[in-house]
Amino acid sequence: MRGYIPSVLLAAGLLILAGCKREAREFRPSPPASQVINTVQVSGINPGANPVGAPPAPNYYEESAYAVSQGKTLFQQYNCVGCHANGGGGIGPPLMDNNWIYGAEPGNIYATILQGRPNGMPSFRNRIPEYQVWEIVAYVRSLSGLLPKDVAPSRSDQLYVKPPEQSMPKQTPTGVTGTTETQP
Amino acid sequence: MSTLARLLLDPGGALLAMFQGEPGQHHILHPAGPQASNIEWLYWVIFWIVFVAFVLTILGFARAAARSRTPAHEMVPVIKDTSEADRRSTWAVGSAVLVTVLALFAVLVMSMITGKKVEGLTSKQPITIQVTGHQWWWEVTYPDPQADQTVTTANEIHVPVGKPVVILTNSADVIHSFWPPSINGKRDLIPGIGSAFWIQVDQPGVYHGQCAEFCGLQHAHMGFSIVAEHDDAFQAWKAQQLKPAKEPTDPEAVHGREVFLTHACIMCHTVRGTDAGSRVGPDLTHLASRAMLAAETLPNTRGAMAGWIVDPQRVKPGNQMPPNPLQPDDLQALITYLQTLQ
Amino acid sequence: MAISEPIVIPQTGEQDRLSRTWAEPRGFWGWFTNVHHTAIGVRFMVTSFIFFLLGGVLAALMRLQLARPENNVLGPDAYNQIFTVHGSTMIFLFAVPMMFQGFGVYLVPLVCGTRNIAFPRLNAFSYYIYVVGGGLLWVGLFLKIGADAGWFAYVPLSGPQFTPGKRSDIWAQMITFTEVSALGVAVCIATTILRYRAPGMTLNRMPIILWEKLTIALMVIFAMPAVMVDSSMLLMDRTINTQFFNPSVGGDALLYQHLFWFFGHPEVYIIFLPGTAIISTLVPAFSRRHIFGYLAIVSAVVATGFLGFGVWVHHMFATGIPQISDSFFTAASLMIVVPTATQFYCWMATIWHGRLQLRLPMLWAFGFFFEFLIGGLSGVMLASVPVDWQVHDTFFIVAHFHYVLIGGALFPMFAGLYYWIPKITGRMMNDLLGKVHFWLFLIGFNMTFFTMHFLGLRGMPRRVYTYLPEMHWGTLNAIATAGVAFMTAAVIVFLVNFFQSRKTGELAGPNPWAAGTLEWGTSSPPPPYNFAEIPTVNGREAVWDAEPDQPVVVGVRDDVPEVLVTHSMDSEPQYREELPGHSIWPFLTAIAVSIAFIWSIFSPWGITYGAIPVVITLIGWLWPRGSSPTPRLAERPREATWSR
C-alpha cells in the first residue's frame, strides 16, 4: 500500500505547481467597488516628479483562463471587433502591438472602456457590467501576449486569422502608463 | 408535497404517476405525431420480443439450476463422460441460436421499415424552420425568400397541426441535440454540419423538448417547446411575430423602454422597432407572447422575469447573461415594458 | 475441501534454489523493483478497486444532487466535473485495469503453467504509468480543475474555445497514460498466451479465459491507438493550434466522434468479455463438468472481438448519418448479440447437465445472468435506429450501459474475486457476508438503475445537473437515489469481509473449489516461482484431466529466472528463455515518461525536452545483460510426476 503514496504525491505535486487559480470559474464575480478611475494616468504629462501609479486591478481576471476566455467571447459579442478587428485594428487602433495610447495597465484599459476616448471609442459605462469589463480587459492584454501562456485563450473555432493569444509573442508595452516607460 | 411524502401517503397514486406521463407533453410512449407513433409501435414490438426472450432465458436458468442442484459444501466428483448430454445440448443450443437469429432478423427488418417511415415524412411545401443551438438557448427562425417576412424568435416553436415541418439544424457553438420526445426522436445540432429534420404534430398542444447532448454548464436548463395549433391560429401567430414591437402607451412602459435602451440590455438583445439590434441573445420583440423564459426554465410572469433579469446567474449559473442590478422603479418599469411586447 | 492447518510441503533442494532465484525483493525501494506477475497483478487489482470506490463516491454525490428537482448539493460546474471523472474513472481506471490488467496479469501465467509473464519489466512499467494517469485525473478533481466535458469529451465542447484552461488537456493525457498502460499489458499477455503455455496445452485445450485474454489483448492493440490519436489531436488543437476539429477551416467535429467510438465500442467489449471468461471458468467448476460447447464459446469470444470493431456508429445514430449507415450498423449491432447469446445457451446447457453447486462465486454468476440479460436485451432495443433516436442520450441509455457494465463486468468481477482471492491470499472469504453483499447489491442496483429506464422514456436527458419540478421526474429519481444506500452497504460488507478474512479466514489450501484450471495446481498463495514443477497438460481442465502419472517438465534452470517457450499452436517445447529479474528501470522510465506527458499538457516543449530523460531511462532498461554463465552440469533427469 505504501508504494502508492509516492506516485500520487508526485502527480499531486506537479499539478499543484500548475496552480488552480487558472481554472477558477466565478459566475458572479464581485468586482471591486467602482474605481475612482479619474486617477488613471492617460498621458505622459503629470504634475510633480513622479507619475501617478495605476490603480490596483483585481487579480482574478488575469489568472483565470475562464475569465479571459469569457473576455474573448464578449470581445466578439459586444462588437469590439467592429473597430479593432481581432487585434489588428481598422477604424480603431490595433490592440496586439506594443503601443498603448492610453496605457497598458489593466486599470488604464478599464478606464478606457468605461470612459470612452476621443476619436471614436465609445463609453460603455452602464452598458457592460463591471466584471465583464474586467474580463475584456484581461483578454485585451492577452492580445499582445502579456498574459501567461496557460491562461491566455487558445484558438477559437472560427476562421484562422492570426495566431491565437497563447502563441502571441509578448509585446512589452510602450506608450503612456504610470508604470512603464513613457514615450512621446 | 415532497416526493417522499407522496410515496408514503399515496403509493398507488405515486406509482401510477411514475408510469404515466402527462399525456402528450414529453413522453416517448405518448406520441402526438406520426413519427413518434411509429417509433412507439416499434418500441413495443421489440419490447415484447425481448421480454419473451428474457422470461424464457431466466426460466431456462432456473430450471437448469433446480434440476442439477447438489449440496454446496460437499465434495461432488467431476462428471467424466458428458457425451450423451452434450449431444442433446447441441440440438438444444443450436435451435436456440437459430431462434435468436430469426428474432434478431425480425427486429432488423422492422427497424428498417420503421426507420424508412419516420425518415420518409417529407413534403414539397413544408413549413421550414431554422433552429440554431446556442449555449443555452434555441434560436428559431422561419426563413422566407423575402427577408422582411422572416420570423425570428427563441425557444418556442409554433407549428400548424397536421402539416410536415422541416427543421434545418445548425449550431453556433458546440453540439446540441434537438429532441421533442412526443413528436420524434432527436437530431444533433453540429456546428459546421447542417441537416434537415422533419417533424409533424397531429394533435394540438404544447410539447416540451430538451437539449439532449451535453453542451456545458446549463445543458440541464436548455428546453424548448413546440406549440402545435390549427393553421389559422398558426398564421395569426406568425403574422403577429412579424410585426415590430408595439409602441408603448403606458408611461411606465415608456420609461421601461428607456431603461431597456440605456442599460446593458441592448448589448445583447433585439427589439425590432427600437434601436436594439444585437444578435447575441434571444430576440425579445415578442417576448410577452412566449409562455416561458430562459429556455423553458421559468414561467413568463412578472416575478420570475424580475428575478431572471436581476440575477440570471442564480437561476442558470454559468449562462451568458450577466446580473443587472437595477433600481426597483426601473426594474418594475422595465418589466411592464417587456410585458407589452406581445 | 476445508483445511484447518497449513500444508507443509517439504522443500526439496530444487525448491530452495527456486525460492532464492525468484525471491521477491524486500524493503521500500525493493517494492519498486518487483517484476513478478503476481505482485503486479495484485497491485492492478487493488489500485483499480480503490478507483472503483472513489468512482462510487462520485456516483453517490451525483445521485444525491438528482434526488430532488432543483436541488443545490452540487452546482453545474462541480456536477460536470463529477460525472466526467466518474465515467472516466470507472471505464479507464477501474474496468479495464481490473478486468483485463488485474485478472489477466495475475492469472494468465498461472493458467498457462509458467513462472512469470512475458516482458515482465514492461508489465511493471504499465502499472506505474496507470497509477500516474489515474492520479492525474483525480488530483485535478480534488483541486476543482477536473475534466468536465464528459467521459468522451466531444468537441467542440472540450475544444480550445469552449473549455478554457487545462481541464480537457488533463483528461486527454489521462487517456494517453492509461492507453499506454493497457497496450503494454496487452503485449505481455498476448505473448505469454501464445508462447509460454505448458506443454500439452494446445490451442484446442486452452482454457477459455486464455482465449478471451488473447482476444482482448489483440482488441486493445487495435483499438487503443484510435483513442490515443483522438485525444492527441484534441490536445494538439488546444495547445499548438492545429485545426483538426475546427469546422470553419475544414476540420470536422464528427471526426472526433468516429475516432473515439471506433475505440469506444471495442472498449466496452474489452470490459465485458473478461466477465464472460470468468463465467466460463466458474460454470464448469461449479457444475462439476467440462463446459459444453467449447468450440462455440471460443468462436463466440473471437467473433465478438472482431464484430466489436464494426458497430461503433451505433453511438452516433442521432448525428444525421445517411440511412444506409443506419441500416448497416443496426444489422451489425444485432449480429453481435448472437455470439453472446450462444455463450448464454452453452452455459445454461452446462448447468443443466451438470451437478450445480451454488457456492458464493456461482451465486454471483447467476446475478450476472439476470442483470446482464436485462442490459443486453435493452441493447437489442437500442440497436434499432428509430428507438435509439428517441432514447439516445437519455437515462434509458444510462440504465442500459450500467446493466451491461455492472451486470456484465462487476458481477463477474465479484464472482471472480470470491473465487480467486483464496488463491491470492491463501484464505477463504466468509460465505455469509458474501451472500449479504450479493443480495444488498442486487436490490440496490435494480432500484437505482431499473427506474432509469422509465426516466429516459419520460424524457429525462443525460448529464443534467438538475431538472424542473414540472417534469415530474422527482419520484423516480428519489427511488434511484435510495438504491445507492443498499449498494454502499453492500460494498462495505465486502470490504469488511475482505479485511477480516485476510486475518481469520479459513485456510484455503491449493484447490478449495476442486476446480480444473492450472492455477489450482499450486499452493495458495502461489510461491514466487508459481509452480515447483512446470506441469504438462492433458485436457481442457488441466487438473481434472491430468493422468495419475502426468509428467512434468525438467531441465528448466532454477538458478536463473527461466521459462519454457513453447510453440504457439501445439505447445511443443521449443527453447528456454531467461527472463529479466527484478529491476528499478521500469519505475524510473515510468517517471520519465510521466514527466514528459504531464509537461506536454502545459507546453509542447514537454515532449521535446521530456524525451531526454525517457531516452536515458530506456537505455538503462535495455542495457544488455549478457547471458548467464553456463549452468552446472544438470542433475540426472529424473522421472518426475505431478498429480492433484
Image (cartoon, coloured by chain):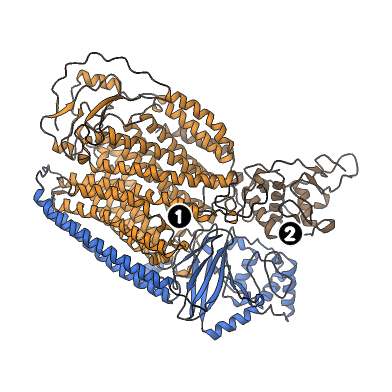
Chain colours: A brown, B blue, C orange
Please say if A70 is above or below B222. Answer: above
Q: CA distance from mark 1 to mark 2?
A: 44 Å
Q: Nearer the viewer, residue C642 or C432?
A: C642
* Image quadrant in which you'd find residue B21: bottom left
Residue A82 disc label: 2
The residue lying furthest to the bottom in this view is B232
Q: Residue at x 43, y 56 (%)?
A: C63
Viewer-side label of 1, 2: 2
Q: A16 left or right of A119? A: left
The chain carrying label 1 is: C
- Around disc 2, counting alpha carbons within 10 Å, would you say few (fewer than 14), some (14 to 19), or many (20 or more)? some
- Percent position of residue A25, x then y: 60, 51
The residue under label 1 is which amino acid type?
A: Met
* Quadrant where the C terminus of chain C is found in the figure: top left
- x, y percentage for residue B289? 60, 77
Residue C540 visible in image: yes
Quick one: C392 or C165, which is closer to the camera?
A: C392
Quadrant assignment, res B93? bottom left
Q: Is residue A44 left or right of residue B275?
A: right
- In the figure, is residue C283 to the left or right of C445? left
Badge 1: residue crowd in 10 Å (few <14, some 14–19, many ≥20): many
Q: Nearer the viewer, residue B140 or A15?
A: B140
Question: Hey, which residue is sitting farthest top in the picture?
Answer: C633
Tag 1 and tag 2, C-beta contact below 8 Å: no
Question: Which residue is identified by label 1?
Answer: C62
Give how far across and how far down residue C591 sits, in percent.
48, 31
At numbered mark 2, what does the secondary structure look like: helix, strand or loop?
A: helix
